[in-house]
């Protein structure tokens, strides 16, 4: 299995621009998670989906952030407009449904907003 | 709500020495507990998990962890450190029967001295 695939690996953009991060989960997994990692705040859960339906988006920091999962094999996280404080590594993870199921993480997208 | 505290943001040991990374959790219901490892510029990988079976859990790369309910702890150990163990380690908790939300600790960076 190819694992969770995220693109791009690196994104550098200017403040005010729209940023779209992409994720392809492991085939057969029905839960998908978006995390953000920073030195100050560690790993934060932004949103997660079960069977393509958003279940909990309480971690989404502001209305500037939105996430979609149009089908079982694709998800996007969009930031519009981007701000320097959004600079972080964004991880996508997938798993089978169930609290005991471990998460499988992608290699992340390192976002830098100047 | 669950939470995880990792004692020591940075641990340094000599090659061949015992590795001990500490994790204490807080949960109002029986927890599932996980340890993940993150190598530079990569996503997190599962080391091991506790799902209410045996209290001593063995994982990959010679690591193991013991669930101690009375101490609300889930410390990670390895008898003999190897240079390749240098990485960041995260403890995480989710709730049995609850929402599939992993809450991560702040992480412990493990350095191995030759």
Image (cartoon, helix red, strand yellow):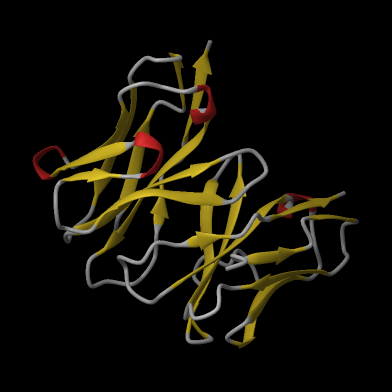
Comparing B16 with A62, the one in front is: B16
| Residue positioned 33% across, 72% down in the render | B99
Residue B85 higher or lower than B40, as above or below: above
Residue B49 position, x and y percent, is 30, 52
Whole-percent x, y for residue B24 in the image = 27, 39
With A37 as the anchor, is A30 left or right in this view? Answer: left
Observer-nearest of B92 and A67: B92
- Identity of the residue drawn at 16% across and 58% down: B52
Can see residue A56?
Answer: no
Vertically, is A83 above or below A73? Answer: above
Q: Position of residue A96 (x, y in %)?
A: 41, 75
Q: Whole-percent x and y of residue B12?
A: 46, 17
**Residue shown at the point (52%, 55%) measured from the top left:** A44
Q: Is residue B112 above or below residue A80?
A: above
Q: Point out the image quarter for the N terminus of chain B.
A: bottom left
Q: Is residue A105 left or right of residue B99?
A: right
Q: Is residue A96 something one can see in this rendering?
A: yes
View extreme (left): residue: B70
Residue sitting nearer the eye, B65 or A46: B65
Viewer-closest of A15 and A51: A51
């Amino acid at each position: 299995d190819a694992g969770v695939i995220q693109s791009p690996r690196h994104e550098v953009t200017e403040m005010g621009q729209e940023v779209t991060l992409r994720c392809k989960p492991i085939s057969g997994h029905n839960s998908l998670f978006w995390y953000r990692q920073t030195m100050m705040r560690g790993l934060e859960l932004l949103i997660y989906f079960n069977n393509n339906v958003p279940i909990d988006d309480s971690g989404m920091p502001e209305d500037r952030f939105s996430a979609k999962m149009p089908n079982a094999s694709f998800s996007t996280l969009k930031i519009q407009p981007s701000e320097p404080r959004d600079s972080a590594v964004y991880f996508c993870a997938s798993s089978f449904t169930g609290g005991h199921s471990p998460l499988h993480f992608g290699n992340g997208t390192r976002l830098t907003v100047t | 709500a669950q939470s995880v505290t990792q004692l020591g943001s940075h641990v340094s040991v000599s090659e061949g020495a015992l590795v001990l990374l500490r994790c204490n959790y807080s949960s109002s219901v029986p927890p599932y507990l996980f340890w993940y490892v993150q190598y530079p510029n990569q996503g997190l990988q599962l080391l091991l998990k506790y799902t209410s079976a045996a209290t001593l859990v063995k994982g990959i790369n010679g690591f193991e962890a013991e669930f101690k309910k009375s101490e609300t702890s889930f410390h990670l150990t390895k008898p003999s450190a190897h240079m390749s163990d240098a990485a960041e380690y995260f403890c995480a908790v989710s709730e049995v029967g609850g929402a599939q939300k992993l809450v991560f600790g702040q992480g412990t960076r493990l350095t191995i001295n030759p």
